[in-house]
Amino acid sequence: METGFTKWIIVVTVVLCVLLELIDTSIVNVALTQMMGNLSATQQEVTWVVAAYGIANVIVIPMTGFLAEQFGRKNYFFFSVVLFTLASMACGQSTNLWELVAFRFVQGIGGGALMATSQAILIDTFPPKQLPLGQALFGMGVIIGPTIGPTLGGYIVDNYDWPWIFYVNVPVGILAAIFTLLFIRDPDRIKNAIPRPLREIDWAGIFLLILGVGSLQLVLEQGETEDWFESAYINSFAALAAFGLIGFIVRELTAKAPIVDLRVLGKSRNLAVGSVLSFVLGFGMFASVFILPIFTQRILGFTAAQTGYMLLPGALASGFMMPVIGRMLQAGVPQKVMIPVGFLIFFGFTFWMANVISPTAGEDDFFWPLMVRGLGMGLIFLPITTMSLAGLKGKDAGQAAGLTGMIRQLGGSFGVAIVGTYLERSIAQNRISPLAHISLYDSATVQRIQAFTQNFMAHGFSFEQAQKQAYYALEGILMKQVSIITYSQVFAMIGLFFVCCLPLVLLIKRVKITGKISMDAH
């Protein structure tokens, strides 16, 4: 355990690293259009800039416990910071798309280690009684990072050029690397650990993890672009994902020294339940951040920077709530109470958003719903994290942190994939219903077309051109109304998913946070 100045320098270092890792999951989204132009890439090709990072992340995160034990946690963390920083510089220097994709993959390898290893470092930095505070500070990075990514990215794209979304990582990465060398220390169990000989490393487990989880992430990232299972390409990787994941589970449950010890799930019921709840959390957190910018930019015409500034207060509110929630946990408020309250608050956010969405909605209309979202996320994330890791020590805690981190990321990928697919397909389906009321035999439709035509003629169009523009305008109004209905349905769907998962809370064992962490069956 660390104390005083050293403890808080370590906290600053690891929280900065978590922020860097998670900001980079979303910061590039607002720069894809600019990248397409500068790198001569199609819309389908440029999505690999996002996919490469996510695939590398989700492969590395579950292995971080093993890698930290094998090479020393300080060494591994320092190497990951340096790798992430160098890859960020290389991304900014890329001269073609596939060079950028390759460096994004390398950046994801470094970044994936930062999140799970940071959590393990905080577990060993804080005494058990203060663990909720340490996890609260970690949670600030996890909640704020994906949300401020579009804000920062939008500002950079509007005022500079796309490479600067990567260059901004470099000074922070250098500072984090220096602090790591000076202040972070390995606990005795890692200092005294004997690295496994190469022949005893679970190479089969590593291969199956890369094959299964990597293929699954690729399917989720590229599925909508490739029209899902209509594509032989997606079908092939879905089969590889199934084969790899089944093989990985069997291998890790039977190997003497597994790369990811899945047996830790059997040691703690709370970890098993927490892993499922982490998936739900990732689903809601990433899906809601994904859909709102699309709505505001496509339908309301907001700029990337406007959307980012709109999301920022709610993210900051969530971050600032984390220490408060940590104090509540220390005071004895049970996770079994806080998690369902957080779920219901998040449901309130989705219900509010489903009703706020309209063609005339402005930034002020979203302020309070997003503040409610921030409160709900705080009440969900921290109790799940402390509940999942309570009672686990040493190597088991590192394995658990990696597992829950991977599952949360996969939940986010599933959320984005499902929401994205639902949007595209439901807009087309929802368009059919109002078409029955739009006809040249309908007097209201004819009057609207005539009004549009006269308006365009007043602006200098010929009759034929004005009438054509009138039809386009009517189609635009139709699609806007249909889109609003669909976005409203998506928010309702996310909220319903959270409500359906509420019974899982009944399986949680209550965690008492005292001088040491113990668990009572309830």
Image (cartoon, helix red, strand yellow):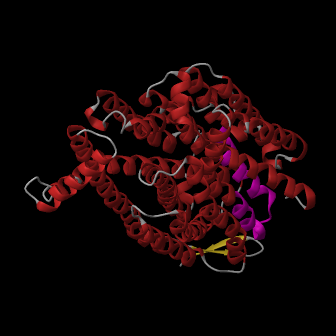
- Whether residue 258 is visible: no
In the rendered view, tell whether residue 196 sits above or below residue 300: above
Residue 236 percent coordinates (x, y): 33, 29
**Count of numbered tags:** 0
Q: In percent of the image, x 31 and y 48: which residue is there?
A: 458
Is residue 112 found inside the magenta-colored segment of the image? yes
Q: In percent of the image, x 20 and y 38: which residue is there?
A: 464
Numbered range of the magenta stretch: 111-138
Q: In percent of the image, x 62 and y 56: which residue is there?
A: 309
In the rendered view, tell whether residue 422 sits above or below residue 91: below
Q: Main secondary structure of the magenta part?
A: helix
257 to the left or right of 435? right
**Image quadrant in which you'd find residue 347:** bottom left
Residue 117 percent coordinates (x, y): 70, 46
- Whether residue 393 is visible: yes
In the rendered view, tell whether residue 257 sits above or below residue 411: above
Residue 326 percent coordinates (x, y): 70, 71
Looking at this rendering, what residue extends furthest in the left direction? 441
Residue 160 percent coordinates (x, y): 68, 36
**Image quadrant in which you'd find residue 144:** bottom right
Q: Nearer the viewer, residue 3 or 139?
A: 139
Q: Quadrant of the N terminus?
A: bottom right
Q: Nearer the viewer, residue 318 or 158?
A: 158
Is residue 215 found inside the magenta-colored segment of the image? no
Q: Nearer the viewer, residue 232 or 2?
A: 232
